[in-house]
């Protein structure tokens, strides 16, 4: 185990280094110069541009800029070009907001997808399977932003309650229980909308994987030996069908950043996806590079978790 962790960690550190280099080069090759933060602002004089370039080492060679940027990032000195605020502080504040959407949406997706997909596979061709298939393809085909706007209109016109932002505007200083319920209500709709597409897609994967595994010889042998159907489905078939989903589970961590840009924008939720989108529009490259670096770290952590879970799901696999 220790040798696997050490070897895997070295590989991922090397991968992370190349990702950081490529990300930095992509930003450098983007149209325009990094110093053109606001070229239409008449107050942005050439002297200010030059002072800006010197402050952020943009007048240095590219490899020096790379060293300064990541050196400042790891020591917490990197600041946003837009408002001169510490990057890590801004990212952490937005990360906490996105974390709630991510956790609730992921729990809804994975706890509902498997029962729906397994039941569809067991009763394939029946009314339940056809209904689940119809609604799954319906949710996949409807754009998320359209579904979000329709739901907002229905909720606001029917219940006459606000759903935008993390809390009701002008709520003041309510009792703690009312504050919690208000936060939960504002979290419910964007989390549910973020999970609908995942439930539709993942339940289809679960169904197809279960049907493929249940057609294997060892499953038929278990039935022929008189093993109860529940044990055949959930002990023999389901466990062997889980292996592809271990990989999928490890790769959901980047959804903390990129998986909720549209939802966060529609509901004015101050999360990381929305911050990254606004940073791209504003050419706030320290924010863009930092978010991209964190995304790479999350991907590598997710793949590491997947590698370890492989052994848990399938005892034949060894680290």
Image: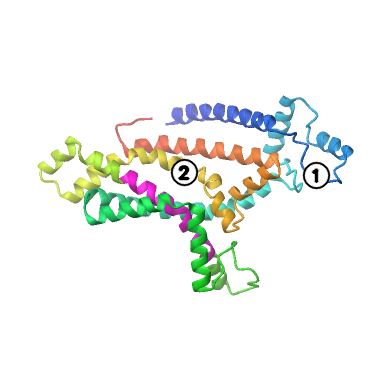
SS majority, magenta: helix
Q: Tell me the quadrant of the picture where the N terminus can be found.
A: top left
Q: Secondary structure at mark 1?
A: loop
Which stretch appears magenta?
185-206
Q: Secondary structure at mark 2?
A: loop
33 over 185 or under it: above or below: above
Q: Residues within 10 Å of mark 2 (few under 14, many from 20)?
A: some
- Left or right: where 216 falls relative to 56: left
Q: Is residue 183 visible?
A: yes
Q: Describe the colour scheme in one phrase.
A: rainbow
Badge 1 vs badge 2, beta-carbon distance below 8 Å: no
Query: How far is disc 1 from disc 2 in space, using C-alphas?
Result: 40 Å
**Magenta stretch holds residue 18:** no
316 over 151 or under it: above or below: above
| Residue occupied by mark 2 | 252
Q: Marks 1 and 2: which is nearer the front?
A: 1
Residue at 79 percent across and 41 percent down: it is 39
Residue at 29 percent across and 56 percent down: it is 131
Give me the disc on residue 100: none
- The front one of 75 and 138 is 138
Instruction: Please state the horizontal and vertical placement of residue 108, each as a whole percent of the image.
Output: 42, 55
| Residue occupied by mark 1 | 40
Counting residues from the start of the chain, the first of labels 1 and 2 encountered is 1
Q: Residues within 10 Å of mark 1 (few under 14, many from 20)?
A: few
Instruction: Please state the horizontal and vertical placement of residue 278, each as a whole percent of the image.
Output: 66, 48
63 over 230 or under it: above or below: above
Q: Is residue 188 visible?
A: no
**Magenta stretch holds residue 201:** yes
């Amino acid at each position: 185990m220790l040798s696997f962790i050490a070897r895997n960690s070295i590989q991922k550190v090397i991968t992370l280094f190349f990702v950081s280099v490529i990300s930095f080069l992509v930003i450098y090759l983007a149209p325009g110069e990094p110093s053109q933060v606001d070229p239409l602002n008449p107050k942005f004089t050439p002297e200010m541009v030059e002072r800006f370039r010197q402050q952020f080492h943009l007048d240095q060679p590219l490899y020096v800029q790379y060293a300064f940027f990541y050196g400042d990032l790891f020591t917490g000195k990197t600041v946003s070009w837009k408002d001169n605020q510490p990057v890590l502080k801004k990212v952490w504040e937005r990360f906490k907001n996105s974390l709630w959407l991510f956790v609730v949406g992921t729990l809804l997706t994975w706890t509902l997808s498997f029962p729906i997909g397994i039941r569809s596979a067991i009763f394939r061709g029946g009314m339940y399977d056809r209904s689940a298939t119809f609604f799954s393809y319906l949710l996949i085909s409807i754009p998320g932003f359209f579904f979000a706007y329709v739901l907002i209109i229905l909720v606001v016109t029917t219940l006459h309650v606000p759903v935008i932002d993390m809390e009701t505007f002008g709520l003041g200083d309510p009792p703690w229980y009312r504050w919690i319920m208000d936060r939960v209500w504002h979290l419910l709709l964007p989390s549910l909308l973020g999970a609908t597409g995942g439930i539709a897609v993942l339940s289809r994967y679960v169904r197809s994987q279960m049907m493929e595994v249940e057609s294997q010889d060892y499953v038929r042998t278990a039935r022929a030996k008189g093993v109860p159907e529940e044990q055949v489905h959930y002990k023999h078939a389901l466990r062997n069908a889980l292996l592809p989903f271990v990989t999928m589970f490890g790769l959901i961590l980047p959804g903390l950043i990129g998986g909720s840009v549209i939802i966060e924008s529609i509901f004015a939720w101050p999360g990381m996806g929305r911050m990254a989108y606004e940073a791209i529009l504003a050419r706030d490259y320290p924010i863009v590079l930092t978010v991209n670096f964190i995304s790479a770290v999350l991907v590598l952590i997710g793949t590491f978790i997947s590698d370890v879970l492989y052994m848990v799901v399938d005892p034949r696999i060894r680290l």
